[in-house]
């Protein structure tokens, strides 16, 4: 029986995944790695920034200062988030529905806690969540299940009693590895591409009957 929902943040709660991908694409291009923001979102959404940069740059065989790149990325992200943070359509109604259905709710994000807090406060929903788990609270990020397992623990639920809402493939894999049901928020329904059959085009498609059917 479903008792809780764990939300990815960037791309599910806030329309900020595009900011991550844009900044990361710009930084990687300096090292001869040409990935478009769309490609980064599709393949690496939800992966810890440190792991993302380290894996790609190591394969390229270039010299880099990871701490400097991390500082640059989060400095730019904070600057962009301070300029504008937009909610993903349907998030406010879905959060209200979760409360009506007495679900415990948490955030499980690859972003840092400070950044996630700023985004959620900007959207005026910080206090709606029972727990916020960020990448700097666990040793391994998505696609490993650590973030979601900690979120479930923090809201006092067994993993099998939780649903994850994700827009990134790595996050969907993490949910599966955590033994949690997963709803994929996608731009196009594709049962071969995404590792869950529960796919929606909009948060507005996640209603009471949909949740009860899982």
Image: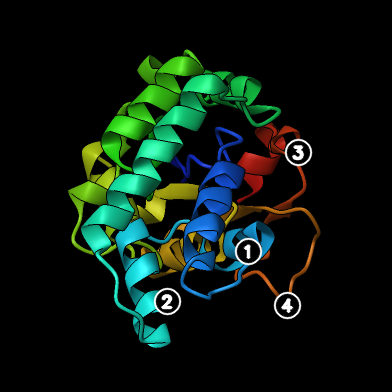
Can residue 146 be seen here? The reply is: yes
| 1 or 2: mark nearer the eye | 2
Q: Which residue lies at the image location 65% right of the left edge and 69% below the top edge?
A: 194
Q: Nearer the viewer, mark 4 or mark 1?
A: 1
- Nearer the observer: mark 3 or 4; the answer is 4
Q: Which element type, helix, strand or loop, lies under badge 2? A: helix
Q: Which residue reaches farthest right? A: 188
Q: Which residue is mark 2?
A: 56
Please, what secondary structure does the residue beneath circle 4 have?
A: loop
Q: Position of residue 45 (x, y in %)?
A: 52, 58
The reply to whether dot 4 and dot 1 touch (C-beta < 8 Å) is: no
* Residue of label 1: 42
Q: CA distance from mark 4 to mark 1?
A: 14 Å
Which residue is at a point 34% across and 26% down the rendered structure image? 117
The numbered mark, 4 or 1, whose residue comes first in the sequence reads 1
Horizontal side, residue 86 vs residue 147: left or right:
right
- Marks 2,4: beta carbons within 8 A: no
């Amino acid at each position: 029986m479903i008792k809780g929902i764990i939300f990815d943040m960037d791309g599910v709660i806030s329309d900020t995944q595009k900011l991550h991908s844009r900044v990361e694409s710009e930084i990687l291009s300096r090292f001869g790695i040409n990935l478009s923001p769309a490609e980064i979102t599709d393949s690496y959404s939800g992966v810890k920034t440190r792991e993302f940069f380290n894996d790609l740059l190591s394969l390229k065989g270039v010299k880099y200062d990871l701490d400097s790149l991390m500082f640059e990325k989060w400095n730019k992200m904070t600057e962009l988030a301070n300029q504008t943070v937009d909610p993903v359509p349907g998030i406010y109604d879905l959060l209200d529905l979760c409360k009506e259905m007495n679900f415990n709710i948490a955030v499980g994000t690859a972003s840092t806690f400070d950044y996630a807090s700023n985004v959620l406060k900007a959207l005026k929903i910080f206090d709606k969540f029972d727990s916020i788990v960020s990448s700097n609270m666990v040793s391994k990020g998505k696609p490993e299940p650590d973030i979601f397992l900690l979120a479930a623990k923090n809201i006092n639920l067994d993993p099998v009693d939780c649903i994850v809402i994700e827009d990134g493939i790595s996050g969907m894999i993490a949910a599966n590895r955590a033994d949690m049901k997963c709803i994929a928020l996608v731009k196009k329904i594709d049962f071969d591409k995404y590792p869950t059959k529960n796919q929606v085009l909009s948060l507005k498609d996640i209603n009471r009957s949909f949740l009860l059917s899982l």
